[in-house]
Structure formats: structure tokens, C-alpha cells
Amino acid sequence: MTTRMFRNTLAGAALCMALAPAGVRAQSALSASVTARYRAEATRDAMTMLGEWQNAWTRDDLRALSRLYDPNALLRLPGQPAAVQGREAVEAALRSRLPAFGRMEVETVDVEVGDRLLYLLQRYTIAPADAAGTSALALSGNFTTVLERDASGWRIRAQTFEAPGAGSSASAAASPSSTAPSAGTPPR
Amino acid sequence: MRLDATRSTLSLAPMMSVARSTLTRRRALLRTFAAAALGVAAHAGALAAQPLPGVHVDPDGDRVRYRGEAMRSATVMLGNWRNAWTRDDFAALEGFYSPNALLLFPGQGTPAQGTAEVRTALERRLRGLGRVELQVVDASVADDMLYLYQRYAVATDPGGNAVSDEPALAGTATTVLQRFDGRWKIRAQVFSEGPLEPGGALLRQGAPSAAVQSQPGAMPAALRSLSCAAFEWTPWQGVTDRGGIVVPVELNGKSYPFELDTGADQTVVSSAAAVEQGWVRQANGRVRVGQVRIAGVDVGAARLATREQPRAASPSAPVGTVGLDLLMGRMVVIDYPGQRFCLVAGNDAPTELTDQVEWTPAEIRSGKLFVAAKVGQQALDGLFFSTGGAGALPLAVDQATWATLTGRAGERDATSRVTPPSRGTPQPFVGAPATGALELGGIRMESPLVYYSAAEPARFRGLGYPASGVLGNAAFWDRVVVLSLGVWPALGVLK
């Protein structure tokens, strides 16, 4: 432990000792402050992780992407009729469908962080794989993500994309057949 | 470790874990906070927390048990939410959502967020829709948040009291619950639309008998031919979501919510409800009601006692108490997991029900249903079954009996302290796990929490009739209980 760490630890303990006689109100205030700090920190960590996820998605980096999902993750991709669950099923779903999706833009609508779970509702726009986002066939809609924290950090525990087209600018590309890779769609 | 200390530890533990996991980047800062948090934990005894009845606490299983209980209380909350949905009770529905809740229905585009928008969205979508059935596909629970992924089906609304199995909407829903002051609220609910066909199967799976207006869970086969009504739990604030039971009772054709209290010897209605109905109080303070129906069963005319009680603040607040007198001569089914209350005429109980019940002989005296039970090696002959008052506790006895059952002397040794809601002075109960198992007929409950009244340590000895304690709802939370209230009284549980 460096001198600075030791000093910080002592400072924390001293802060606590100073507050202890003040009773429950002081404890609650400190607890609230620690909670607020934790939440801000946890949300930043989660956003960093989701940034990695978005980059891996755009790069079609299946290996990096898979690592960001919890072993028990549930996933429903745009155009998928039902969710899949478990590492292998999630990887298979990503492998089969990712090539048809292009770059993704996301906009956070709602977020809530807890001690071990974090929930997000976001709006997405996925460019088609062959049009660099300029085509009218872009998919868009809402999706819900639930992150779960383990010893190694945040992982995606559940991610469900609303069926494209519901309240969005999605088009024919929403159908499973049109989002599946085809002979005429070269991989990026 | 006792639960009152445990609760505080639980809430701080995640922060400690955060401190560990992010040390590499902000080590110095978080060490400061970790040290501060440790200090707070050391003084956590000052923070009051109440335990959950029926949950035996041990140091190793605290978190697992806490989360198990959290999941159960969330299920209860969602059962009540479903009942309110089916009734189109928007005032009650609003109460299940957090102030900044987000709600998104299929095709809605922009989600509704906040109390006013959520209520407007519910009012707009639910009118014209019938009951909703849900089936959990995936779930994860933490100390303060809970995530659920469910299949759902919403039936068409056939109008009147009819029940439809035809799906109007089906698909999947992601629901996030957040804990506020010990109670779960819906923080986010996102419905996605899917094919209708699986929705029909989901609705048929939970198909109710004609009298049932809503179905919180799948109905056991033995109950399918019965006339049932959904009941709702009322919470003991800060203690449990499953405090009391509220059932709908029809008085002269109008439905009122009543608390169910099998430990009460008489049925009571509030003076405000009596005035509203124009009933004239007789010299003995009772009112005569020409027609009483409970769970779709006509129990005829009744003279009900009245009690002074102001007009209920909310339409779902109980206006009275159904006591044992109104249930006599009948068979009563309380399906705790399914939140159903069913009534059968005493001589008309179907064999598919009676054959499936493991019975324990009971006795009715002094207006109560007494059963014999055993805790460890100690026989308890004078226990009466009560679903009201302190009935949310698994077992309440006098202090002397408590000391025998728990091997502890008194309040200082108690591991839990709860204060039931009361119309008079609040009376705390203190509890500790029994050293042995509670055995009652086919029921065995390992080391139940046993309580006594701190204000009246000998309250049962002083009742004026032989009684050793109360057996309450918490002993049966995972069971279907059947009370046979005829000439050969018995208490049974569905096998």
C-alpha cells in the first residue's frame, strides 16, 4: 500500500469516526453519499462497457461481443421471433445475424442502476450492412438491456430488441428473411 | 448474525464489492469510501430493520434467503397488480409503479414515463381489454432491483362478469422492479407484441371458473370446479407484503373489500358502509343484510356487527372483517400461492378436492378453529388458526411457551421485532427461531419464527378460554389450506 492509499484509508476511517457519534442521521447521510457515488461510478462503468459493445458490434467482432454477455444471457435481436438464452445460443444468434446488421447508433431514453443490476431503455438505429447507414432500409426501434455485475464487472444479462417497425422507421428489412444474410449481400 | 444487523450489511456489501472491483482506476478515492462504509457498518446496530416472518436466519444463507423472499414478495406484488389490471382499477394500478416508472406498450413508439403519463397510458390501453396472464421465462434478483422476462397474454373483454380465453394481445414483456422502503414497485415495463396463438394457450392454462375475476397463478386441478375469488394481500409496512388477506364480499349486490380473519368470531362491517347502504342499526348494534355472497357463493342473509370506522380513503381499503361465523357449515379453501379464496357448501365438496387433502382434526370452541400441532417435542394443543391480526406471523404464543420453544429467555434474546398494523396502540411482537420443526398434519416447517407480544407476554393465557397461541398465514404461504367448518371440523392442506 502506498503512502497515499494509506492516508486515504485513514482519512476515510477518521471521517467515519467523526460521524459515528452523530447517530443515525449522519450515518444515513454518509450512506446516501456513498450510494450516490457508487451509482455514478457504476453507471460510468456500464456506459464504458456498452461503448465497447457498440464498437464490437460495428466491427462484427463476434469474439469481443460474446465476452460482454453473461453466460446465462437472454438475447432477442431485431427481427428474431423469440429470445435465445445461454452463451452458446447467444453466440450462435450473433454469428448468424450480425453480418446483416451495419453500424448501430443508440440513444439512451431511461436508465436505472442498482447494487448489482442496471437497466437501460434505448432507441437504436441499425444501418444495413451494405449501405453505411444511408439507406432508407435502416432498422430502428427501442431495446431494453439489463446488465448484471459480477467480480469482473458489468455483463449483459438480458437484451431484447423490440420488433422493428413498432413505432419506428423500420421497413421491409424488419422481416427475419430480409435481415438474414443472403447470397447477394457480401459480408463487410 | 441477526437479521437486524444483516440488513444493513446487505445494503453495504455491494458498495464494498464495488470498491474492490474498481480499485485499479480509482483506488485511492474508493479506499476512502470503503473505509467510511466499514465504519458505518460497524455502527449499523443503530439502524433499525425488521425481519421477515417465517424466514429463519443464519449467517451463511442470509443473502440467498433474502433474495428468495424478495422474489416471493415481488410475485405477490405482481399478483395484486394483475388483479388491479383485470378490475380496470387504475387508482390501484398507479400505486404499483414508481414515480418515474416507464411504460411501453406495443406500437406506442414513445414510452410513457412518470405517474401521470403511465396512468394515462394504462387507461387508454386497458379499456376494452380483459385479464392478463403471465409466465416467467427469465429472472434475476438483486437486493434492490429485480428483472423479469415474461410471456404475456391479454384476453379480450367480453363485458359483464364473463371471462374470455381469446387473446387480444400477446408477446413478451421485460419488467424491472425497484425496491422502495422495502416494497417492490415497477420501474420499467416494456411489452413487445408477438403471435397471438401462444397467448391463447397461456390464457387457457390459467382458465378460471366462472366466479373468478382474475387468476394470479395456475389453478390446481382440485380447485377447478370450485367457486373462487382472487384475494389481495395487504402489507405490513416494512415487514412483509403478505400481511393480511382482503376478499371481495357482495352485500345486497354491491361488492366491498373485507379483511378475512378466521380468528375473529364475528363478521363486522364499518358504520360508514352501513350508513351508505341505508341499513338501520338494531339495538344490539347489528345490521341485517338481506343477501351476502362470498366468492360467488350465496351465504344468505346475515346480521353483521358494526364498528365505528370512517369512510375508507380508497375503494380497495377493507370496510369490514369476515369472521368465522359467516363461513360456518362450509368448506373454505385458501390458495396462498395462487391468491384465491374459494367457498363450497359443506355437503357439496367435490371428491377431487377432499381426496387430495391431508386432514388434521380441528375443534371449534369460543368462536375459533383450534388445531393440535407440535414444535420439536413440545405439543401445542390450543393453537387457533387466524388469517387476521397477528395471523401474518407463522406462530405467536405466550412468552413462557416461547422460551420453551426457542430456548431463549426474553426480548433481549429475540432475533426479530415486528409491529403489526393496529387500530389501537401498536403492539410489537418479538420473535426467534424455534429449536425444532413445526409439525401439523402433513405440514412440516423447519425452525419457524415464533413470536410473543412484548406488551402482553401472557395474552393467550388471559383470553378467558384455553388457548396457547395463534397459527398464522406465514406457516402456509406455499400451501393450499382447506378448512372444513362442518360438524367434524378439520384443517387440511392440499397434497
Image: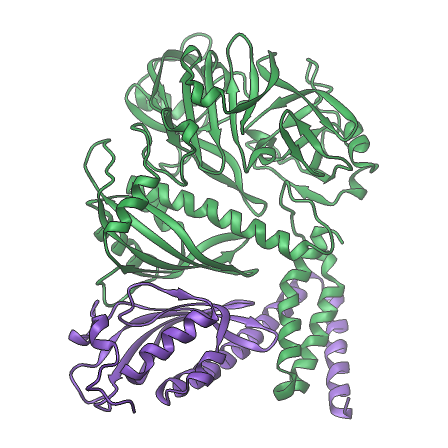
Give whichever of B444, B459 is nearer the camera.
B444
Tell me residue B390's x, y (percent). 61, 31
Q: Is residue B377 left or right of residue B157?
A: right
Give whichever of B309, B470 is nearer the camera.
B470
The quarter of the displayed image where residue B314 is located: top left
Locate the C terminus of chain B by quadrant.
top right
Outermost residue, front side: A183
Locate the N terminus of chain B by quadrant.
bottom right
At a point 23% along the width and 71% down the height, the residue shown is A176
Colour given to chain B in the rendered image? green
Task: Answer yes or no: is residue A43 visible.
Answer: yes
Colour option used = by chain
Q: Is residue B25 left or right of residue A88?
A: right
> How many numbered discs, if any?
0
Task: Answer yes or no: is residue B270 visible.
Answer: no
Q: Is residue A115 left or right of residue B192?
A: right
Tell me residue B339's x, y (percent). 44, 36
At a point 22% along the width and 81% down the height, the residue shown is A182
Colour given to chain A in the rendered image? purple
At a point 35% along the width and 54% down the height, the residue shown is B151
Tell me residue A39's x, y (percent). 53, 73
Tell me residue B458's x, y (percent). 75, 25
Residue B186 to residue A128: above or below:
above
Q: Is residue B31 left or right of residue B163?
A: right
Give whichever of B28, A76 is nearer the camera.
A76
Residue B173 to residue B272: above or below:
below
